Amino acid sequence: MVDMTAPDLDLKTGSIDDAIANLKEKFPDAVSDDTRAGYGGVIVDKGQLREVAQYLKQNLGFDYLSSATAVDYLGEGQHTTDDHLEMVYHAYRTSGGSALVFKAQTDRDDAVVPSLVPVWKGADFQESEVYDLFGIKFTDHPNLRRILLWDGFHGHPMRKDWKEPYYEEEAKPFGSRWPGGQVHRAEEKTIFGKNVQYPADIDLSRLTDISESKLYEGFGMGVDVQKVTHDGVETDQLIVNMGPHHPSTHGVFRMIMRLDGESVRDLEPIMGYLHRNHEKIGERNTWLHNIPFTDRLDYISSMGNNHGYVLAVEQLLAHNKRWKPPTYRAEVLRVLMVEMSRIINHLWAIGFWLNDIGAFFTPVLYFIEERERMMDFFEAVAGSRMMCNYMRFGGVFADLPERLRSTANLMNDRVRDYNTMQFLTEMINERIPRTIDDLEELLTENEIVKVRSIGVGILSKEDAINYSTAGPLLRGSGVAYDIRRADPYSIYPELDFDVAVRNEGDMYARYSVRVQEMRESIRILKQILPRLEYTANESATANNGSHGDKAPLGEAYGRVENGKGELGYYVVSAGNKRATSNPWRYHVRAPSFINLTPLGAMSEGMKVADVVGILGSIDIVLGETDR
Amino acid sequence: MELNLQELSTTQYPVPADMANNVAITSLSKLYNWGRRNSMWPMLFGLACCAIEMIATASSRFDFSRFGMEVMRATPRQSDLMIVSGTVTKKMIVPIVRLYNQMPEPKYVLAMGACASGGGPFKEGYNVVSGIDKYLPTDVYVPGCPPTPQALLFGMIALQKKIDGESLSLMDDVPWYGVGPSEPTPVPILGPDIIDPRQMDMIRRRAESGARQADTAVMDVSRELPAWRSPALATGAVAEGGSGTATASAEATGELTAIPGGKAPWEESEEIYEQRRINALRRKAIRASRRTQEG
């Protein structure tokens, strides 16, 4: 048994190397360095995984489990000789600093790993996802289920030997397409004319077994009505289903609730209705191919998604001899775009949240005016309104045009032929601040907003950390954790801004954090303007492609503070080569997905009408939740 | 084809002079279509990224209520138009088909964006349906990823034009002008993979023949098959002089053709495609002849 003595304060704030040294000292048999080329962190024997995790959390201060995912090393050949599955965990201290990476290996045929939910509740959904996609079973997991696909789906699709119906080759570009490819439709090559394949032992007589009622039973919510007694009066508990088609679920999200009168007793989120196989496709793509796919994760702030991904891959590419980092101007442009995206994101988050608590679409219509202006700006710079596909490894796609000219947008066109810098100056100094002032005037002291949101959906500080929440949800619960400050990237260290925090942990606190963050974003943008001017002669695109198209072997984890929280990309370049043109593993640590973990706990005891508000205050986007 | 009041009141039928400006005469089809095209209520139903552009289209800058679509209804029972705005996944197609079945006729489907039209960038994904038209009859396809609000408006105007062309006399073309309600679309089943009930027979026969082979072998065979247009290639023409892989696939499929009393699976799909093609051509011809009559 491990000695769980009083926590050592020095160890809790020391460097990652100190922590690893201490860990190896404490668990000499179970912990060893990960010595593979380009890898870092430690490999933990899975038999003692939970003890090591407990020690990390309690004694070394790693209270925040950011990401938990798996990698399949089937036939990889370079880093390992045996085929195995590997769990990869990234843990942080909420006081700041970089990640401690630890891994646990398990056999492919009998994949079992102890669950870390008893240590960090934030592992709950992530382990379910790994079980769903990789087939690793987690012992002592409270609710292990197929979270993205459905019960009865054949196989675990993220395993390397699982092939999708339209499978052509392991990696792009496919031979049928390039060079000298021809146009064909994938449907024509399959028997059923559809994207389906069935195992040979399919039993068509058993299909009705997998039904909705079984789903309800799986959650311990039988379809039979349960009787409860209140003050001698017997009442029925009611099961209510919301979604996947529901106007307040922000897309195709689904919740099953057990209600006692108007109060929620139990809530289970069900997702996967927009699971579009981002990661499997990402592993077939080349490194560059993935940038437009990241746009479609959190489709409200595509620029931020680009940023996280290029940061992750740039960590790998930095080992390349030819590598040149992005120019200063490129970094400035990146921050400009990302902060504008954050404002758009928060405007919409607040707008949709108000939809949920009763202000049907009017606030959104107020905010959409400035959003449309910024969309026009994005369109003029990147070529597309929403899916900007703007950042590149080593720079950005294009510099700002001198004048904003929108040829596509001939209707209601407000920014046709406008000086770019003048437009930005007006936006940043006048228009956006004015919109936020309007917003605050209408909402911040609004009686209805306050009554509906203060004290509703409370998440305590401890729970917020334990559940691995991120973004405004975490900061609304009193944790001053913003990656731009805690683990800075890009040019954020030289920018002056504050981290918005509220201590109440309710819906109103999250709203206040978002408003404050928009004001901080404006502060950042105001510092960006002079930087744009004095770097005007610098090139933002000079170092694009200085790296070649292959990434050296290794792993990398890039994370950014996106509008919705910590967006992380875990990429692995592996294979029996010196460098690879396709990721071996491409994982997205999606804030929308992990922020949903405490939804059940937050909704318990709340009224059913508040649940939609709580969901709105978390601010999810289904493209990112389900990926 | 907007209704022109001048045109309506000057007809071939004798109208008393004192009523000339008070009576309008038109065909019933025109009147039906006129009402329908200008009060199209879309379902408030977003799937993915395109939904955001759909909201932008509905809101103040683009404002599709200018075309009679101001009311987005959250329930399918009050909607005429399903805008499939985003990637359709196998898990989601089940509720989508149910929603479609719940919509009262006449009902229309607009596939918004690349994903809904044909799978889009996510087409190769194992959980992605290659376009909503694999399950539901689709009226308009709007390209784009996502389509701009202007493109969506264009698609809706195209749908209005399509409605203008409907006629009470062509019940094959417009099923809701027939007698009684149309058959509901069978709801897909989530099995080992998504199962379209219309293909159940095919799946069953294929499972029976494939049971002799290993799981992966069956799947590989399906990939090696040539396009449906040339089933002759699979049945032997290639086996004599083709390349190694083609021979292998011909051998393997030779195994599959031995279904007692049945056709080879691809022949069945060939028939389905052929039937669809013939129907499409027939509809096209009807529309063309109608246009010439009107013109």
Image: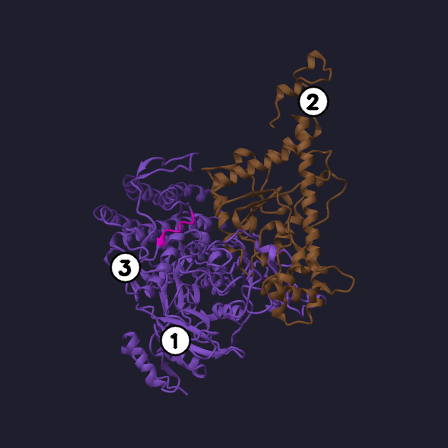
Chain colours: A purple, B brown
For residue A332, above or below residue A208:
above
Q: As drawn, is A581 to the left or to the right of A208?
A: left
Residue marked by disc 3:
A325
Indicate the amino acid at tag 1: Phe
Residue A569's spot in the image, x, y percent? 40, 63
Q: Residue B28: which numbered mark, if any?
A: none
Residue marked by disc 1:
A102
Q: Cα distance, mark 2 to mark 3?
A: 74 Å
- Element type at marker 1? strand
Q: Are both tags, 3 and 1, on one chain?
A: yes
Which image quadrant: the N terminus of chain A?
bottom left
**Chief SS of the magenta region:** loop
Residue A409 visible in the snapshot: yes
Indicate the amino acid at tag 3: Pro
Q: Chain of mark 1?
A: A
Instruction: Say whether marks 3 and 1 touch (CB < 8 Å).
Output: no
Residue depicted at 69% across the width and 62% down the height? B203
Near mark 1 (Cα within 10 A), the count class, few <14, some 14-19 or many ≥20, is many
Instruction: Say whether marks 2 and 1 touch (CB < 8 Å).
Output: no
Q: Cα distance, mark 2 to mark 1?
A: 80 Å
Near mark 3 (Cα within 10 A), the count class, few <14, some 14-19 or many ≥20, is many
Q: Which residues are magenta?
A: A386-391
Residue A113's spot in the image, x, y percent? 49, 78
Q: As drawn, is A63 to the left or to the right of A85?
A: left
Residue marked by disc 2:
B25
Q: As drawn, is A494 to the left or to the right of B48?
A: left
Residue A316's spot in the image, x, y percent? 34, 66
- Element type at marker 3? loop
Near mark 2 (Cα within 10 A), the count class, few <14, some 14-19 or many ≥20, is some
